[in-house]
């Protein structure tokens, strides 16, 4: 237990202890193996997506460039939390330093904020490709793409830096047991000796502004897309246009549904939703999208599927 004086700083050598999933605190090899398998899938799949897009000159369209950035964010998000989770469930290595805890918290929040922004610009890309195909290259120039990417990153940093600062500057003078499998800000803030409501309100309002505005613009984009698609005279053209959006819709569902459920279930408290359910939802939110995104895009996008298959065959031929 930490026995620190009541002030607004904490010793840099202070240590927190992550319990993993409440109720499953002891080492569980099956959980470690499952997490390792999902992490390996996420890591290999996203690295493969990045390599294929960067190496293939035919995959330099805006959609693929944004997908490359999304894959990079998936790697950052999964790598921020999964190795520590595996350590907790395999050997019980649950300790994490104060600085490491808040560094993890910061990267998780920035990566998730950037992902929702990337989903927005990918929806805009589909809108331009389907509704304004003749102006696609004129609208989505490399300069515009770079500007949108930088805006997404700056927005994530501006919104999430104050949250990490607010939580890290709370006084921690009591328990150092974090009832979570990573340094989720609400779980850490509950340990503070001061009222954590300001940081919790900032988190709720910030997530509502970021996610709410992004979802509103995405919904508008798809409304315009659907209106344009169903205005086409050819059924084949309609199906082809809709098929280009299926991967993006699937990725959005994987990201937004668990994420929104995790945020608002945490606010309901464990009197309404059991704590282990809250932790599992938060874990799924960070684990499932990075593991499944490459599979969805790999299976649904013909160009990427062909390039990946060609790269794998070339690698196997070189080994034989």
Image (cartoon, helix red, strand yellow):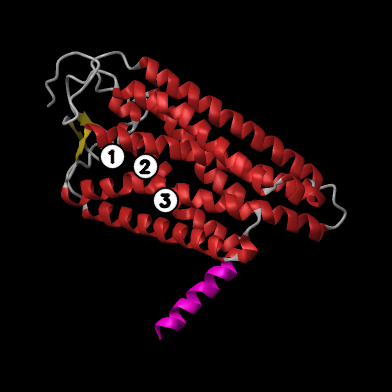
Badge number at residue 75: 3
Of mark 2 and mark 1, the one earlier in the sequence is: 1
Q: Which residue is found at the position 34% from the left and 29% from the top? A: 185
Above/below status of 234 relative to 263: below
Q: Which residue is found at the position 51% from the left and 60% from the top? A: 49
Task: Please name which of the two marks, 1 or 3, marks the residue nearer to the observer.
Answer: 3
Which residue in the rendered view is the most extreme toward the right? 233
Q: CA distance from mark 3 to mark 2?
A: 15 Å
SS at badge 3: helix
Q: Is residue 188 magenta?
A: no
Of mark 3 and mark 2, the one earlier in the sequence is: 3
Q: Is residue 242 left or right of residue 36?
A: right
Residue at the disc numbered 2: 283
Q: Quadrant of the C terminus?
A: bottom left
The reply to whether dot 3 and dot 2 touch (C-beta < 8 Å) is no
Highlighted range, magenta: 305-320
SS at badge 1: loop
Residue at the disc numbered 1: 181
The reply to whether dot 2 and dot 1 touch (C-beta < 8 Å) is yes
Q: Give the percent coordinates (x, y) of residue 290.
A: 45, 50
Q: Is residue 28 left or right of residue 269?
A: left
Q: Is residue 313 magenta?
A: yes
Above/below status of 136 relative to 263: below
Tell me the quarter of the picture where residue 278 sits.
top left
Q: Give the percent coordinates (x, y) of residue 233.
A: 88, 54
SS at badge 2: helix
Above/below status of 40 relative to 78: below
Q: Give the percent coordinates (x, y) of residue 138.
A: 76, 48
Q: CA distance from mark 1 to mark 3?
A: 18 Å
Tell me the quarter of the picture where residue 5 sits.
top left
Between 40 and 138, the residue placed more toward the observer is 138
Tell me the quarter of the picture where residue 33 sits.
bottom left
């Amino acid at each position: 237990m930490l026995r620190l004086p009541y002030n607004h700083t904490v010793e840099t050598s202070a240590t927190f202890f992550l319990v993993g999933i409440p109720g499953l605190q002891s080492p569980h090899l099956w959980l470690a193996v499952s997490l390792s398998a999902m992490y390996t899938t996420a890591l290999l799949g996203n690295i493969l997506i990045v390599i294929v897009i960067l190496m293939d000159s035919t995959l330099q369209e805006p959609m693929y460039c944004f997908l490359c950035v999304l894959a990079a964010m998936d790697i950052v998000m999964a790598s921020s939390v999964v190795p520590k989770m595996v350590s907790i469930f395999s050997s019980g290595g649950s300790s994490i330093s104060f600085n490491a805890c808040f560094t993890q918290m910061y990267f998780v929040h920035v990566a998730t904020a950037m992902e929702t922004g990337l989903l927005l610009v990918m929806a805009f890309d589909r809108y331009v490709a389907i509704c304004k195909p003749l102006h696609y290259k004129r609208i989505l120039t490399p300069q515009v793409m770079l500007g949108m990417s930088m805006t997404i990153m700056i927005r994530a940093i501006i919104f999430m830096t104050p949250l990490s600062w607010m939580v890290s500057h709370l006084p921690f003078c009591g328990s150092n047991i974090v009832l979570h499998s990573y340094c989720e800000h609400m779980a850490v803030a509950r340990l503070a000796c001061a009222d954590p409501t300001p940081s919790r309100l900032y988190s709720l309002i910030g997530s509502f502004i970021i996610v709410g505005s992004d979802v509103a613009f995405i919904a508008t984009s798809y409304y315009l897309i659907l209106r344009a698609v169903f205005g086409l005279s050819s059924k084949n053209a309609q199906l082809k246009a809709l098929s280009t959006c299926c991967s993006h819709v699937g990725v959005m569902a994987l990201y937004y549904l668990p994420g929104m459920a995790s945020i608002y279930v945490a606010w309901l408290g464990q009197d309404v939703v059991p704590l282990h359910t809250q932790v599992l939802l938060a874990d799924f939110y960070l684990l499932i999208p990075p593991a499944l995104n490459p599979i969805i895009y790999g299976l649904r996008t013909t160009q990427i599927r062909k390039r990946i298959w060609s790269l794998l065959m070339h690698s196997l031929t070189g080994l034989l």
